[in-house]
Image (cartoon, rainbow, N blue to C red):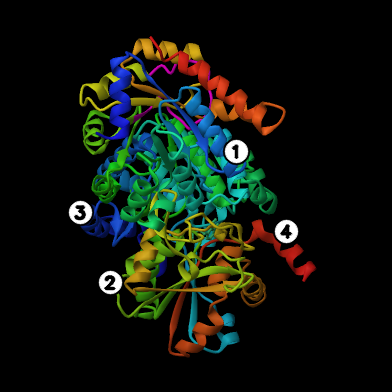
């Protein structure tokens, strides 16, 4: 089978059935990944989480649901996405061969649409007429506004005031799509605070509102469910690698905000022990400054937004402010499954600075004619090291989670001020 | 018998309900919190909730968010809160219930936190984002150290949850009177009577209702129309304190006089 005949419906179905087995194992641990995860939420939400868990269980064993989702991923979102050999970038570094999993080519410009489509179908099954979301870079907000328009949901998106400034283009896109964008001015005015506000809305309106969490974070079943909706990325990449190269890659690399694009590409490779799974966090001004957003590299165990994971906090358990040039990575928590993969040593987590990400962004523009999102540029920024480490016989798959059109203003002002 | 149980027993004997005012620890400083807490005790408060400020209070509305921010800006910590409880415990016998979010407790450890609470004279603890499913170790720690573990129930809680939560709860059960976050409202919460009745059919443990109580009339109607054992008032008192002009002493007096008026509404 060639890449062009890759049957996306089969990939989606495969992902969902494989995961049924894992999910059964996880179920016995009640939504935990090792010690991580759980449901640390106000009582008001507990019944809604149970309802969501039950509906998701029913949906993913329902042929009609799986077919509808696969159809939407193919015809509306544009799956499968190519696995693209970055020939000039490979030559430039002179080491391992670099392949880009082109999630940036998806409708709306990032991987976030995979999850938004899946959850919108669930919300419709649960007969909830209203969707809410939090967003940092605005990509998840745009994806949610898009599916709301496509299916006729009412839609409100919470976004930190600081992020509405640095991702102004996406704010306007959401409004064009008919969503209300609610700027959040509490706390650090970024993704964490937008998430708090979305949770508050959900607690108030849970009877008729579904909260589409935008990453593999939050209380069970979100981390598992969001991962499953993104696992199509890794499933495709794995098949494409086998078809094109007759082998698996040596490493998969992805940036880590909450960790959804990374979990999506990692998950189908977890049993392939020869494949290194590398998550790249935002080191901001540097890991040895307070201005970063790297909880796996520098955080400690704690509870934020409903699950136990690694978070950035002081010794008394107060959440610390974060910094990243990338709004989508500027978050003090991370999905609980990543915390587990780190602790059992199955995945490696590293961090790159704002400056390294900016450089990687420009390099991909010039070498490949592709403008990546600032988030995805963090994954690219680990290539100088990794291509050398693996050498010319090595194969690397980078999850290019989104395109950088939204970041042009930020990049321009960063380059002009440096 | 625990201080909380004794309080509810005395109240029931007088056919009276508890008034439970809430203070945010360290808002705007520790000395003010101490004076406010003692003023509420003087005003007839039956139990006092001490909110331990957290950076991300996602069950709270704007009033408590602002209070928490002021407290954190002033440098308030969990240690300060426990020290404050130890100090006021020397001056009053009113039951004191710290209210917090899970993360600060998780950092200390369930057992160590329960031990500290016992040591400073706190009577029970409310953890807003810890449902009993995640809390068996906490329930055990509370039982070992004689600290009541107060859990919440909400209008959305189904009967299975009511049964499970009432089993894990001690001291009292916190009935969330309406869907949403904390914050003063003026109406009598429409779902509270039904919720109290459902909880009551599972347990004799006292039940206090909170979220959105702000006026004497509203409290009187709620007490008359349900078998609630107490009413928690938080945002409305903080709003009163915030909006009063003048010295700290005058603002404390304004909030305490509001508490006195609300306490009257809990008497038969
Ligand atoms: C393009 C892109 N990549 C990555 C992320 C980070 O999220 P996650 O770690 O959940 O993939 C975002 C978030 O906004 C994004 O827009």
- Alpha carbon of mark 4 to alpha carbon of mark 1: how far? 47 Å
Q: Which residue is mark 2?
A: A271
- Chain letter of disc 2 in the image: A
Kindly report which numbered mark, 1 or 3, lies closer to the viewer in this rendering: 1
Q: Secondary structure at mark 1?
A: helix
Residue A14: x and y, percent? 28, 59
Is disc 3 in the same subunit as disc 2?
Answer: yes
Q: Quadrant of residue B100?
A: top left
Magenta span contains residue A46: no
- What number is the disc on residue A409? 4
Q: Main secondary structure of the magenta part?
A: loop
* Magenta segment boundaries in residue numbering: B174-191
Q: Is residue A55 shown above or below A418?
A: above
Q: Residue at x 47, y 38 (%)?
A: B50
Residue A378: x and y, percent? 56, 70
Q: Secondary structure at mark 3?
A: helix
Whichever of labels 4 and 2 marks the residue nearer the N terminus, that label is 2
Q: Is mark 4 within 8 Å of ligand 1?
A: no
Magenta span contains residue B189: yes
Q: Residue at x 70, y 50 (%)?
A: A165
Whichever of labels 3 and 2 marks the residue nearer the N terminus, that label is 3
- What number is the disc on residue A126? none
Residue in the foreground of this view, choosing between A237 and A243: A237
Q: Which residue is mark 3?
A: A28
- Work out which quarter of the rendered image holds the N terminus of chain B and state it: top left
Whichever of labels 3 and 4 marks the residue nearer the N terminus, that label is 3
Kindly report which numbered mark, 3 or 4, lies closer to the viewer in this rendering: 3
Residue A18: x and y, percent? 25, 60
- What number is the disc on residue B32? 1
């Amino acid at each position: 089978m060639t890449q062009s005949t890759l049957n996306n419906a089969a990939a989606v179905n495969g992902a969902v059935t494989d995961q049924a087995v894992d999910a059964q194992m996880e179920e016995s641990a009640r939504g935990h990944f090792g010690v991580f995860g759980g449901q640390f939420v106000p009582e008001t939400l507990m019944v809604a989480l149970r309802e969501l868990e039950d509906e998701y269980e029913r949906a993913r064993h329902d042929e009609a649901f799986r077919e509808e989702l696969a159809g939407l991923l193919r015809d509306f979102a544009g799956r499968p996405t190519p696995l693209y050999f970055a020939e000039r970038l490979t030559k430039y570094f002179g080491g391992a061969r670099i392949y880009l999993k082109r999630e940036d080519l998806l409708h709306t410009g990032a991987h976030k649409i995979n999850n938004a489509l899946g959850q919108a179908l669930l919300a419709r099954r649960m007969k909830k007429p209203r969707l809410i979301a939090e967003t940092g870079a605005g990509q998840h907000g745009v994806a949610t506004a898009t599916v709301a328009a496509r299916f006729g949901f009412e839609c409100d998106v919470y976004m930190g005031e600081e992020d509405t400034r640095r991702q102004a283009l996406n704010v306007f896109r959401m409004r064009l799509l008919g969503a209300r964008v609610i700027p959040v001015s509490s706390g650090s005015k970024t993704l964490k605070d937008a998430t708090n506000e979305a949770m508050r809305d959900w607690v108030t309106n849970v009877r008729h509102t579904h909260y589409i969490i935008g990453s593999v974070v939050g209380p069970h079943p979100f981390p598992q469910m969001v991962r499953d909706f993104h696992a199509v990325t890794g499933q495709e990449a794995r098949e494409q690698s086998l078809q094109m190269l007759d082998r698996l890659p040596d490493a998969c690399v992805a940036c880590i905000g909450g960790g959804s694009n990374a979990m999506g590409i990692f998950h189908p490779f977890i049993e392939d022990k020869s494949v290194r799974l590398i998550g790249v966090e935002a080191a901001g001004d540097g890991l040895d400054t307070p201005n970063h957003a790297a909880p796996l590299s520098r955080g400690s165990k704690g509870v934020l937004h409903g699950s136990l994971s690694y978070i950035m906090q002081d010794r008394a358990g107060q959440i610390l402010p974060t910094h990243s040039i990338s709004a989508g990575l500027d978050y003090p928590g991370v999905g609980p499954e990543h915390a587990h993969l780190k602790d059992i040593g199955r995945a490696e987590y590293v961090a790159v600075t704002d400056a390294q990400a900016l450089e990687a962004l420009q390099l991909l523009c010039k070498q490949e004619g592709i403008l990546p999102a600032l988030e995805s540029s963090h994954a690219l920024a680990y290539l100088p090291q990794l291509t050398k480490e693996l050498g010319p016989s090595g194969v690397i798959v980078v999850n290019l989670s989104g395109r950088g059109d939204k970041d042009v203003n930020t990049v321009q002002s960063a380059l002009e001020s440096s | 018998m625990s201080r909380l149980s004794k309080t509810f027993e005395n109240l029931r004997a007088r056919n009276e309900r508890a008034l439970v005012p809430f203070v945010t620890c360290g808002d705007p400083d520790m000395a003010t919190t101490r004076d406010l807490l003692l003023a509420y005790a003087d005003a007839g408060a039956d139990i006092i909730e001490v909110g331990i400020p957290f950076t991300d209070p996602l069950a709270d509305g704007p009033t408590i968010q602002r209070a928490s921010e002021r407290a954190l800006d002033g440098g308030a910590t969990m240690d300060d809160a426990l020290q404050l409880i130890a100090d006021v415990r020397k001056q009053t016998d009113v039951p004191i219930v710290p209210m917090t979010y899970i993360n600060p407790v998780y950092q200390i450890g369930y057992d160590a936190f329960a031990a500290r609470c016992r040591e400073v004279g706190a009577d029970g603890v409310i953890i807003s984002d810890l449902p009993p499913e995640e809390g068996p170790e906490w329930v055990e720690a509370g039982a070992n150290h004689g600290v009541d573990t107060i859990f919440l129930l909400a209008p959305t809680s189904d009967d299975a949850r009511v049964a499970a939560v009432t089993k894990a709860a001690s001291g009292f059960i916190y009935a969330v009177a309406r869907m949403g976050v904390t914050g003063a409202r003026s109406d009598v919460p429409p779902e509270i009577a039904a919720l109290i009745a459902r909880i009551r059919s599972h347990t004799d443990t006292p039940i206090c209702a909170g979220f959105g109580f702000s006026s004497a009339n509203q409290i009187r109607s709620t007490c008359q129309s349900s078998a609630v054992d107490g009413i928690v008032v938080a945002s409305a008192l903080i709003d009163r304190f915030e909006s009063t002009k003048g010295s700290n002493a005058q603002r404390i007096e304004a909030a305490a006089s509001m508490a006195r008026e609300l306490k009257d509404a809990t008497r038969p």
